[in-house]
Image (cartoon, helix red, strand yellow):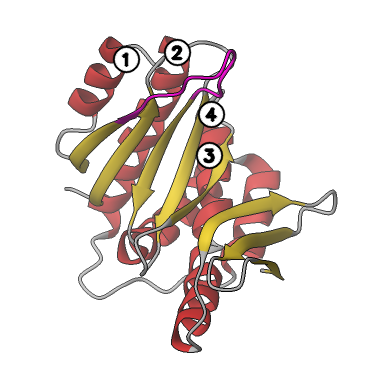
């Protein structure tokens, strides 16, 4: 079962073989509609691979990630699952067994990707915004539990991100270059620029 459709964006230093293997492993789990490469010209540019999903896909992933943490994350995972999702609502047509199996395959693919790229290469998850921008968060993908927890943390934020962006756009304001900033207390703040005014904005999620 496919859990959604994604665009994969990667910097040009990431080996093509790693991306090809990733796309192959995601077959039947995530429909990759495009692999986009970013060319950077600085002396030591950042290195990353980013998965961009739309809002509905993240809503589908949420309950499955909650179940994964409950089963494989130990007591810490169980506590965090409850904290992140409280009482997760399953979307209409949700097939629990199939979606959870697909999420496990997705998590395994992320862990294997990290093994195939340079140590400094980051793996990130991102939400496609209504205005075509995307905003993401770096994932910890050293093992299955860490990857599941990172994905779950981001999935728990997407509705708040979507609502904030939608309210800004409906008010006639613009959002460019959005970023998520993690606080020392595990809080998350979204920062962006309004190109119409040139002003910086931020909102705690």
Tell me the mark number nearer the camera, choosing from 3 and 4. 4
| Highlighted magenta segment, given as a residue range | 37-47
Determine which residue is flagged by label 2: 117
Is disc 1 in contact with disc 2, using a CB cutoff of under 8 Å?
yes
Q: Measuring 54% from the left and 66% from the top, which residue is drawn there?
A: 195
**Image quarter hosting the C terminus:** bottom right
> Which mark identifies residue 139?
none
Give the prevailing secondary structure in the magenta stretch.
Answer: loop
As rendered, which of 89 and 123 lies closer to the eye? 123
The residues bearing labels 4 and 2 have C-alpha atoms spaced at a distance of: 12 Å
Is disc 3 in contact with disc 4, using a CB cutoff of under 8 Å?
no
The residues bearing labels 4 and 1 have C-alpha atoms spaced at a distance of: 15 Å
Instruction: Give residue 138's position: percent from left, percent from top.
Output: 57, 38
Determine which residue is flagged by label 4: 141
Instruction: Give residue 175's position: percent from left, percent from top.
Output: 51, 67
The residues bearing labels 3 and 4 have C-alpha atoms spaced at a distance of: 15 Å
Is disc 2 in contact with disc 3, using a CB cutoff of under 8 Å?
no
Density class for disc 1 (Cα within 10 Å; few <14, some 14-19, many ≥20) is: some
> The residue tagged with tag 3: helix, strand or loop?
helix
Q: Is residue 156 left or right of residue 24?
A: right
Q: Residue furthest right?
A: 184
Q: Measuring 60% from the left and 52% from the top, which residue is drawn there?
A: 179
Tell me the mark number nearer the camera, choosing from 4 and 1. 1
Q: Is residue 51 left or right of residue 2?
A: right
Determine which residue is flagged by label 1: 18
As rendered, which of 45 and 65 lies closer to the eye? 45
> The residue tagged with tag 2: helix, strand or loop?
loop
Determine which residue is flagged by label 3: 72
The residues bearing labels 2 and 3 have C-alpha atoms spaced at a distance of: 26 Å
Tell me the mark number nearer the camera, choosing from 4 and 2. 2
């Amino acid at each position: 079962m496919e859990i959604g459709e994604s665009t994969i964006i990667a910097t040009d230093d990431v080996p093509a073989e790693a991306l090809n293997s990733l796309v192959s492993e995601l077959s039947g789990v995530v429909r990759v509609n495009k692999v986009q490469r970013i060319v950077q010209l600085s002396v030591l540019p950042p290195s990353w691979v980013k998965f961009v999903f739309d809002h509905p896909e993240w809503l589908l992933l949420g309950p499955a990630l909650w179940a994964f943490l409950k089963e494989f994350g130990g007591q810490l995972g169980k506590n965090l699952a409850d904290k992140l999702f409280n009482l997760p609502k399953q979307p209409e047509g949700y097939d629990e067994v199939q979606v959870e199996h697909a999420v496990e395959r997705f998590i395994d693919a992320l862990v294997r990707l990290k093994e195939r790229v340079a140590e400094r290469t980051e793996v990130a998850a991102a939400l496609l915004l209504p205005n075509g921008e995307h905003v993401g968060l770096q994932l910890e993908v050293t093992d299955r539990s860490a990857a599941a927890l990172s994905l779950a943390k981001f999935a728990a934020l997407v509705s708040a991100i979507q609502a904030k962006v939608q309210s800004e756009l409906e008010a006639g304001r613009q959002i460019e270059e959005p970023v998520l900033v993690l606080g020392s207390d595990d809080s998350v703040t979204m920062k962006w620029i309004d190109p119409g005014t040139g002003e910086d904005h931020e909102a705690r999620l």
